[in-house]
Amino acid sequence: MSADSWKITLPCTRAEAEAIDSASDLAIEAVLMTTEEVEDDVERWRLDAYVEHEPDAALLATLHALVPSASGHDPVVERLSDEDWVAMSQAGLEPIREGRFVVHTSAHAIEPPAGGRAFLIDAGQAFGTGHHGTTSGCLAMLDALAVAGKQFAKVIDVGTGTGLLAFAAVELWPEAMVVATDIDPVAVDVTRENAVRNGIEGVSLFVADGARHADIDAVAPYDLVIANILAGPLVSMAPELAAIADSGATIVLAGLLETQRETVVAAYAACGCTLEAIDRRGDWTVLRLTAGMERYVPTAPFDPKGRDGWALDL
């Protein structure tokens, strides 16, 4: 965020917050965050939008349209200094623990337990501090795979965000080739910075729209595919993610609501994948699937339609 950052706040309902969180086609140049104001109160949620310019009437109208329940409320608009943004982004982000991993921000440094690994991941312009249920659930699922003795030679993290899940894969399977991609160049830059900050080496990192990319194909097939994005893109990308997975590969999917699980599972079942495990975190669900014993070969050309906004940004 720049020195001219602004925050716009509107009340919303839980249903509206879920719709915003799961949408893959919001053409809004803003960082959107939804928050539960009162625990278990479906009517008391909040939408915060962060932009790098003073909001105009058109933007305010667009945000209002996302939350019809706030039609009678004027948005609260405030200007943020760089210091305000940093303090806001770090506030309340206490360290989290998932399996052997501890994830913390600069404001809440902590030592890992014996045999564990701490990652410093500050909040910012890329998703994936570990504090959202999708990311923490993926960490737990990856750790469980390692505890069960699973070994992987080629790993890809599609939609890497901050790089956290790719870093966890490096820690769990140090001999593996790990590829991390994101459609957002900012996220790739953030991941590169986080890798240096955490002493992570060996991750092949590049910008890619989906899974059909020359650099991805050059390493395929992968025996572990991770995609923490959103339900819509997960469904539309099912054929291409299945196509880069090796026979019998493990596929970890996240960024979907529990209400979207059946749709996502069906899309991958059509590509020969079998659901093996579910980790539900509140309204969000993490899936572990196994690719078919014969590598999936798409029967139709890949269609990039609907990919816009596929990176999970909450």
Image (cartoon, rainbow, N blue to C red):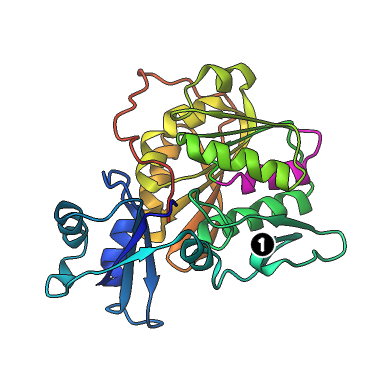
Determine the main secondary structure of the stretch shown in magenta. Answer: helix
Is 205 or 276 nearer to us in this picture? 205
Horizontally, residue 229 falls left or right of residue 205, namely left
Give residue 185's position: percent from left, percent from top.
48, 34
Q: Amino acid at mark 1?
A: Ser
Q: Name the element at disc 1.
A: helix
On whether residue 23 falls in the magenta region, the answer is no
In front here: 259 or 122?
A: 122
Q: How many marks?
A: 1
What x and y, as percent, mark residue 136? 59, 59
Residue highlighted by disc 1: 106
**Which stretch did the figure color magenta?**
162-176
The image quadrant of residue 37 is bottom left
The residue at the point 83 percent across, 66 percent down is 113
Q: Is residue 65 left or right of residue 35?
A: left
**Label 1: how many Cα within 10 Å (few below 14, some 14–19, many 20+):** few
Check the image and name the residue furthest to the left.
72
The residue lying at 28 percent from left, 43 percent from top is: 25
Q: Residue furthest right?
A: 114
Say if residue 92 shows up in the picture.
yes
Query: Residue 62: x percent and y percent?
Result: 18, 54
Q: Position of residue 82 (x, y in %)?
A: 48, 59
- Give the position of the C terminus as an image quadrant: bottom left
Is residue 312 placed above or below 236 in the rendered structure? below
Residue at 17% over, 72% down: 74
In the displayed structure, 169 sits above or below 85; it is: above
Residue at screen point 81% across, 59% down: 116
Using residue 158 as the reference point, say whether residue 314 is left or right of it: left
Answer yes or no: is residue 290 visible: no
Q: Quadrant of residue 249?
A: top right
